[in-house]
Amino acid sequence: MVVVNRIADFSEDMTAWRRHLHTIPELGLECHETAAFVAARLREFGVDELHEGVAKTGIVAIINGQGVGPTIGLRADMDALPILEETGLDYASTHAGKMHACGHDGHTAMLLGAAKYLAETRNFAGRVALLFQPAEEAGGGGEVMVNEGVMDRFDIAQVYALHNAPGLDFGRFHTTAGPIMAAADTFTIRLTGQGGHGARPHECIDPVVAACALVQSLQTIVSRNTNPQSQLVISTTQIHTGTTDNVIPEEIYINGTVRTFDKEVQAMVIRRMQAIVDGHAASFDLRAELDFEFGYPPTVNDPASTGFAAAVAEEVAGNAGVETHFAPVMGAEDFSYMLEARPGAYLLLGQGEGAGVHHPKYNFNDEIAPIGASFFARLVERAQPMAGS
């Protein structure tokens, strides 16, 4: 690893920042304590502009380089998850039922590390816009920031983000041109029959039996309606009904997620899902309603930006430390909205073995923070070199 020396000098500070943030996890757009801590550090570093209250608790900090040039955006997400932490760490969450189980505390610390270095050295032209974003896990803070005009207001020309990756080799960067993460949509189905005594089903219209058949039929969209070379996930994740063993319920609630990369596949899923729901309503003589809610779009890396980011990552991790043909994953990211607005790239940074993200025993590996901060710093210096450098 070729970690920037100055960043290595304050790696312990980055660890302290991250562990403090880990103790105060916040959800969605309500990242008030987190934002206050970030803003205080940025003021200490001497950023040139500090814009608070973006997307409610988001922050945009501007650092001016030397000479005229464009503005490059670097994004870190700040929010946590509604999970009860089970790590036993001495810096575990102090907010009951909330936990930094996805490493956004680490992402924030890495971008703060890059901010400290860039504010000290300013070895670049133009400007860097540091985007500290709330509500990645839920609420679409990335979309809110874009809709509030962040890209235009700060004249951001390109934008980049990093995410830690448990289970991938320590310090190794992974990315790919084109789609890297899927669209995430939600479906809800309500079946209404006629309840009654569990011993007299012939007098009822049983939504439980209909729901069992319906959930199985939804999987035929994947197995029989989709080209096997296309990527599609349909997962039913909730079925709620009933109150006791001897009563057939009146209604049943079915909920789940759909993950796609292709808009045509997405449209096909909606058509087939509606047809299956309507068919089961007729077949079982009950009423059925389908609500399909569009979520985050696919995260699609700009090919040229991805190639550039990979070359910068090689300066930090070496040729063998960068994988540029990473297989897209079916998880989703609201950085997708920023990549729809501007060219850029999203990369994963391996943090070695350990509990996966969204697990109550997960913890960010502080040893990768200087690597990620060095990548962000070099990205700015390489994208916008000073005249004569």
Image: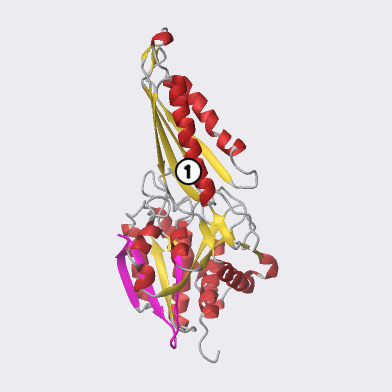
Figure check: 167 above or below 387: above
Q: To which residue does mark 1 refer?
A: 86
**Which image quarter is the C terminus in?**
bottom right
The extreme top residue here reads: 199
Q: In x, y percent, where is residue 149?
A: 34, 67
The reply to whether the magenta stretch includes residue 292 is: no
**Does residue 52 appear left or right of residue 346 in this picture?**
left
Q: Nearer the viewer, residue 150 or 88?
A: 150
Q: Nearer the viewer, residue 357 or 128?
A: 128
- Asked if one can make out residue 331 in the rendered structure from this viewpoint, the answer is no
Furthest-right residue in this view:
320
Q: Nearer the viewer, residue 5 or 89?
A: 5
Q: Residues within 10 Å of mark 1 (few under 14, many from 20)?
A: few
Q: What segment is highlighted magenta in the picture?
A: 49-75
Q: Position of residue 192 (x, y in %)?
A: 37, 24
- Above or below, 316 relative to 173: below
Label 1 is placed on what type of residue?
Glu
For the point 36% across and 48% down, the residue is: 95
- Picture residue at 63% right of the left edge, 44% below the top: 227
Query: Please, what secondary structure does the residue beneath circle 1 have?
Result: loop
Q: Position of residue 123 (x, y in %)?
A: 49, 84
| Viewport quadrant of the N terminus | bottom right
Left or right: 180 in relation to 199:
right
| Residue 210 appears in the picture as rendered | yes
The overriding secondary structure of the stretch rendered in magenta is: strand
In the drawing, does residue 170 fall left or right of residue 362?
right
Query: Splitting the image into 4 quarters, where does residue 187 fall?
Result: top left
Q: Residue at x 61, y 47 (%)?
A: 230
The picture quadrant where one finds residue 198 is top left
> Residue 100, image x and y in percent?
44, 52
Residue 144 against residue 125 in the figure, above or below: above
**Residue 309 image-quadrant placement:** bottom right
